[in-house]
Amino acid sequence: MGVAVVTMEIVVLGSSGSFASADNPCTGYLVQTPGASVLLDCGPGTLGPLQRTIDLADLTAVVVTHNHPDHWLELPVLRNVFKYFQKRSDIPLYGTAETRRMDDAVTVRGSSATADPFVWNVITAKSIVTIGDQAWSFSCTDHPVETLAVRVDCGGRSFVFTSDTGPAWSIDAFGPGIDLALYDASHLSAFEGKGIPHTSARQAGERCRAADVGRMVATHLVPGSDPEAHRAEASAAYGDAVDIASPGDRFVV
């Protein structure tokens, strides 16, 4: 019997929405393919799980979806690692213009001997980025700041992470052929229509079903939420079983 070849795997480093729980860091995922290991968002607390998942020397690039602190504030700590302890240089870093501005504001510039290990690349919804064997595309979501959902394609398989979004945006912006979606499902349907800039579990399930997504994973639940209630609402709307993203989960695309 032949051995199955893994084209793409998504590792959950943290999935808490807005703030970390006692056992779940803020948002962070590792997108692994044969040719690249990319950190997708780096919220507080994600550096530890990242080091349990890969050798930091093997990190190919970092992509940050927006400037809200629960999605990127581990970046200055990761910079310290590569600047002073496990020295590296020229690591591609992709993010919005406002994220770069905020990162610049908290970065202490040293001498050339301690230059920034990251090379900043500002991206927009129109950007197309190739990282190793991964093709990245983007779409602006429904959120108070510029926020980019991402689609990653590799070897004929595709993965979408919605980042944070309200209901005015939908995953069908990325077109057909989505094999796996990690979808913002921050709250339950009882909170719909209350001005929350996130998607309910029901809304997320409906949109994944309409876009014929192969597998749905709900994420960005606020600590204290009932994951089974989120799973039930999302599954009913999606028409199939829905997973809840938890630290250490690995999803093969």
Image: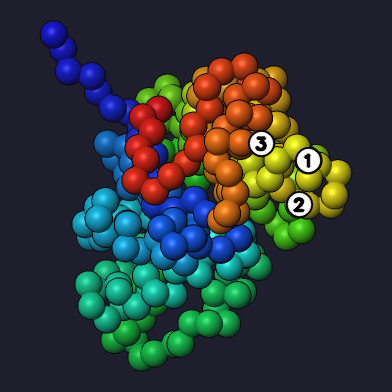
Q: Is residue 238 left or right of residue 42?
A: right
Q: Residue at label 1?
A: 190
Front residue (pair 240, 75): 240
Which of label 1 and label 3 is nearer to you? 1
Residue 211, given in percent of the width and then of the height, sits at: 66, 22
Q: How many marks?
A: 3
Which residue corresponds to the image point at 49% horizontal and 50% vertical from the top-left? 15
Let me know if residue 161 appears in the view: no
Image quadrant in which you'd find residue 213: top right
Residue position marked by numbered label 2 in the rendering: 197
Instruction: Give the crowd class for mark 1: few <14, some 14-19, many >=20 residues within 10 Å.
Output: few
**Circle 2 or circle 3, nearest the eye:** 3
Q: Crowding at label 2, few (<14), some or many (≥20) Cα neighbours within 10 Å?
A: some
Q: Is residue 149 left or right of residue 82?
A: right
Q: Which residue is mark 3?
A: 201
Q: Real-space Cα distance between discs 2 and 1?
A: 14 Å
- Where disc 3 sits, the SS reads helix
Q: Amino acid at mark 2?
A: Pro
In this view, the residue farthest toward the top is 1
Tell me which amino acid carries mark 1. Answer: Ala
Residue toward you, 169 or 234 = 234
Q: Could you tell me if residue 158 is visible in this image?
A: yes
Q: Are marks 2 and 3 in contact (CB under 8 Å)?
A: no
Sequence order check, earlier mark of 2 and 1: 1
Secondary-structure class at tag 1: helix
Q: Position of residue 190 (x, y in %)?
A: 78, 40
- Seen at 52% across and 54% down, the residue is 16
Residue closest to the eye, 112 or 87:
87
